[in-house]
Amino acid sequence: MRPYRGIDASERLAHRRSRFIEAGLDLLSTPPGEPTVRAICAKAGVAVRYFYESFVDKDDFAVLVFDTVISDLTATTQAAAATAPVRDGNRAGMANIVNTIASDARVGRLLFNAQLTNPVIADKRTAGAELLTAIYFTDLSTVLPFEANERTKALSYFAVGGVGQTIDAWLNGRLQLTPDELIDQLANVLDEFVEPRLHQPRRTATEASGR
């Protein structure tokens, strides 16, 4: 296809996709989060015929929006934690997540708002939580002085689920903390997860006495 007004077809397609993603953040993060194709196109300011250039249907659209958001947040959070001193990794990661959501609440609502009923988003959240749990398990394993185990995995699920529910409560006004206070609270809790006793079976009274 020839350039139109100096912009080639691939650039025009990429521009329309970015407008669709921006519209998706607005529409999919607002309960119930199940917009029609026409509503998506109207929000993006793009003709309906162009929707099908990029997406098979509105479910395909929801998947792309969610994957784009969680991929971006995961990448920047991992980068923030990796460049911080080891002792400050949790704080750096939480700061990136909370500050990103504070600057664009749509990101937080899309990823964590329990009021969204879109089944595609619900499925993607489950898959996203598994991904984040696996990442956190791997990161946690690297700082433990012993081999990670099923208790470590349980803590990883607890961390990801707990952080998500806390952020949802914060976004919906049920938790009255400043962003810095929220970062501090979440980081302090996660710092405790390196405590060895949380990863090891509890010793019985007989074992403790050496009998």
Image (cartoon, rainbow, N blue to C red):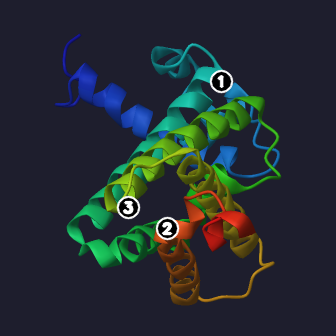
Pick the front one: 152 or 88: 152
| Horizontal and vertical percent position of residue 50 | 50, 20
**Residue at (41%, 40%) from the top-left corner?**
18
Q: Which mark is residue 46?
A: none
Amino acid carrying label 2: it is Pro
| Horizontal and vertical percent position of residue 73 | 43, 54
Q: Which residue is mark 2?
A: 196
Quarter of image, res 38: top right
Amino acid carrying label 3: it is Leu
Quarter of image, res 41: top right
**Residue at (37%, 60%) from the top-left corner?**
77
Q: Is residue 205 visible?
A: yes
Left or right side of 8 for 135: right
| Horizontal and vertical percent position of residue 117 | 82, 40
Instruction: Give me the C-alpha separation between circle 2 and circle 1.
Output: 47 Å
**SS of the residue at dot 1?**
helix
- Tag 3 near tag 2, CB within 8 Å: yes
Mark whose residue sits in front, 1 or 3: 3
Q: Which residue is mark 1?
A: 58
| Horizontal and vertical percent position of residue 85 | 23, 75
Q: Which mark is residue 144?
A: 3
**SS of the residue at dot 3?**
loop
Q: Residues within 10 Å of mark 3 (few under 14, many from 20)?
A: some
- Tag 2 near tag 1, CB within 8 Å: no
Quarter of image, res 142: bottom left
Q: Is residue 203 visible?
A: no
Amino acid carrying label 1: it is Lys
**Residue at (71%, 65%) from the top-left corner?**
206
Left or right side of 91 for 62: right
**SS of the residue at dot 2?**
helix
